[in-house]
Image: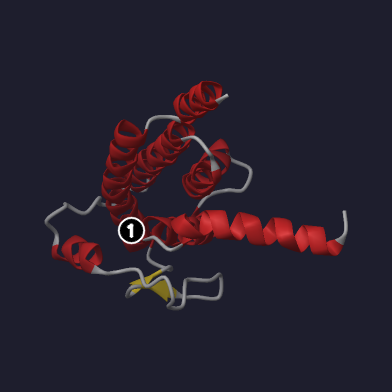
């Protein structure tokens, strides 16, 4: 394949995925994915099953969201976005298990630190966390309790946003129908015209 065809293909993918890439739900997924990678590198053995599962859940949360947005079918988008949503629930459980096993505290949802973290907005155009970062939103990565609770809070926030996102997809599906249904309508219209 020529490089111009590759560029056209990449531009088409970026344009189609661009809708999701301009949403808070996407950028929070990116932030969670990056923070999860840092957390795993610091606190979970690379050779453990937990490491693999948490890495896969964070990846699935982000990638299934993008893959769903690239689908022609709203129904397929709903399914993949639903898998993405479930991944954040799985990560919450993993972080709570981590805290329990270490004898550390899961912060209550009304804890002032949680309320403060929930109020933070992700800026899609701002700097994002990297491996070189030492902290995120005032939470030091060297504090396992605070770092795990940061991720729990972000995953719960993402779950809330994903629920709203899924509701929007469901409403769109109800109004416009599915991909196959619309193809069938086009086929009938074509047959009636000819």
Q: Secondary structure at mark 1?
A: helix
Q: What residue appears at the point 55 percent right and 75 percent down from the top-left corner? A: 132
Q: Position of residue 59 (x, y in %)?
A: 54, 47
Q: How many numbered dots are placed on residues in this image?
A: 1
Judging by the rendered image, the residue that carries numbered circle 1 is 145
Q: Which residue reaches farthest front?
A: 194
Q: Position of residue 1 (x, y in %)?
A: 87, 53
Which residue occupies the foreground of this view, 124 or 48? Answer: 124
Q: What residue appears at the point 49 percent right and 75 percent down from the top-left corner? A: 133
Which residue occupies the foreground of this view, 136 or 80? Answer: 80
Image color mode: secondary structure
Q: Position of residue 48 (x, y in %)?
A: 58, 40
Q: What residue appears at the point 55 percent right and 46 percent down from the top-left corner? A: 70
Left or right placement of residue 17 versus residue 139 in this view = right
Q: Position of residue 166 (x, y in %)?
A: 33, 40
Left or right placement of residue 180 versus residue 158 in this view = right
Q: Quadrant of residue 136?
A: bottom left
**Residue count near mark 1 (Cα–Cα under 10 Å), binned few <14, some 14–19, many ≥20:** many
Q: Is residue 109 above or below residue 177?
A: below
Left or right placement of residue 138 versus residue 50 in this view = left
Q: Which residue reaches farthest left?
A: 110
Q: Quadrant of residue 143?
A: bottom left
Q: Is residue 12 above or below residue 97?
A: below
Left or right placement of residue 56 versus residue 146 in this view = right
Q: Is residue 11 above or below residue 71?
A: below
């Amino acid at each position: 394949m020529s490089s111009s065809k590759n560029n056209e293909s990449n531009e088409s993918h970026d344009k189609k995925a661009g809708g999701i890439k301009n949403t808070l739900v996407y950028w929070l997924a990116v932030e969670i994915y990056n923070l999860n990678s840092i957390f795993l590198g610091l606190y979970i053995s690379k050779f453990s099953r937990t490491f693999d599962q948490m890495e896969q859940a964070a990846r699935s949360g982000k990638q299934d969201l993008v893959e769903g947005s690239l689908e022609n079918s709203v129904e397929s988008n709903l399914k993949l976005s639903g898998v993405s949503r479930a991944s954040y629930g799985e990560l919450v459980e993993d972080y709570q298990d981590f805290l329990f096993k270490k004898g550390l505290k899961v912060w209550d949802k009304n804890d002032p630190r949680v309320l403060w973290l929930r109020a933070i907005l992700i800026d899609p155009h701002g700097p994002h966390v990297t491996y070189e970062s030492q902290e995120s939103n005032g939470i030091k990565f060297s504090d396992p309790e605070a770092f795990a609770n940061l991720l729990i809070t972000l995953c719960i926030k993402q779950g809330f946003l994903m629920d709203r996102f899924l509701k929007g997809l469901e409403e769109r599906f109800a109004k416009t129908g599915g991909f196959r249904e619309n193809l069938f309508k086009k086929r009938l219209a074509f047959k009636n015209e000819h």
